Image (cartoon, helix red, strand yellow):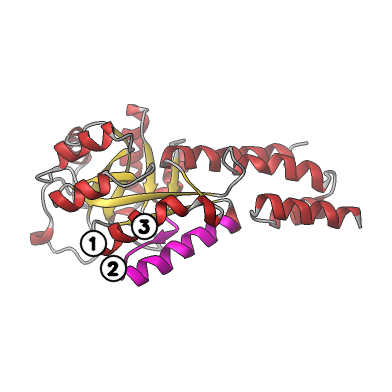
Amino acid sequence: EPGNIILKEYWMQAGTVIWPLALVLWLGGLTVASVAADSLGDLPENGLPAIAIIIDDLGTKRELGKRIVNLPGPVACAFMPYGRYTDALARKAHTQHKEVMLHLPMQAVEDAPAMLGKGVLTLDMTRPRFRATLARDLAAVPHISGLNNHMGSLLTRHPGTMAWLMEALVKRGDLFFVDSRTTSATVAEQLALEYGIPNTARNVFLDNVPTRQAVRVQLQKLIAIAKREGTALGIGHPYPGTVAVLAEELGKLEQQGVRLLPVSRLIELQQEGKTAWQASLSR
């Protein structure tokens, strides 16, 4: 039937989530073809699903950090605020056209007071102390475009402290936020949405098991999510296995049907897709 043909063609071209089409058909008032056209805002310019990759914990290891900064493509580099090599590597990443991020330390559930280092945001901070610590952390990494949380399984589940963070980001006005999702109870992404901050959240950790074989499996999982949903975000770390796999595989991504984008562009695509979907419902 014509409707089935249109649906099949859209699926083959876009490779994205198909459930919005079914919902619109149930609601009535729109054709499959019109929804398909609107939903293509979810895809990058060349029509391929998109992934972004962030490498966390940079700034403490010089040689691995240099290898990551020199990886091909727009791999985002997230730096600890007071790492020995943070300043030099962040500046190098910027010259290599990598997006530089602050990897913002936050208190985790398992953190004892003695484990908390310099620049960590904690649940017992007063609002002025929280703001002052955050301001110093933001200033410690040059050329940042955004930030994500380092640890934070305790702090990111508390709306009050996350509201303080988002208020500061609104005031600054030039940063995106990525929820690393170190706990399923996180409210960070929701607070970023409520405050109107460009944001996204991690889909896959690439190297919880840091062997090459395990990293390859996780990279394929990231690619599969992007093909299913249009976009996907992976986070890795400066491990030898992670660096080796990315050095081998990043240049082959388009052959596998996905494209690597900067995190900021991935966020724009996700927002464009949401806007197109909302517009389709208002017709």
Pointer 1: what residue?
Answer: 240
Of labels 2 and 3, earlier in sequence is 2
Q: Mark 3: which amino acid?
A: Glu
Q: In the image, residue 20 lies at what x, y percent?
A: 70, 52
| Badge 2 vs badge 1, beta-carbon distance below 8 Å | yes
Q: Quadrant of residue 109?
A: bottom left
Of labels 3 and 1, earlier in sequence is 1
- Position of 229 with respect to 2 (left or right) is left
Q: Is residue 206 magenta?
A: yes
The mark lying in front, picked from 2 and 1, is 1
- Magenta stretch in the rendered image: 202-227
Q: From where the camera sits, is residue 133 visible?
A: no
Q: Mark 1: which amino acid?
A: Pro
Q: In the image, residue 165 lies at what x, y percent?
A: 31, 40
Residue at point 17%, 42% (across, down): 81
Q: In the image, residue 235 lies at what x, y percent?
A: 36, 55
Could you classify mark 1 by the number of other residues whose Cα lies within 10 Å: few (under 14), some (14-19), or many (20 or more)? some
Pointer 2: what residue?
Answer: 210
| Badge 2 vs badge 3, beta-carbon distance below 8 Å | no
Q: In the image, residue 166 lies at what x, y percent?
A: 36, 39
Residue at point 22%, 56% (across, down): 107
Pointer 3: what residue?
Answer: 248
Rendered position, 21 above or below 210: above
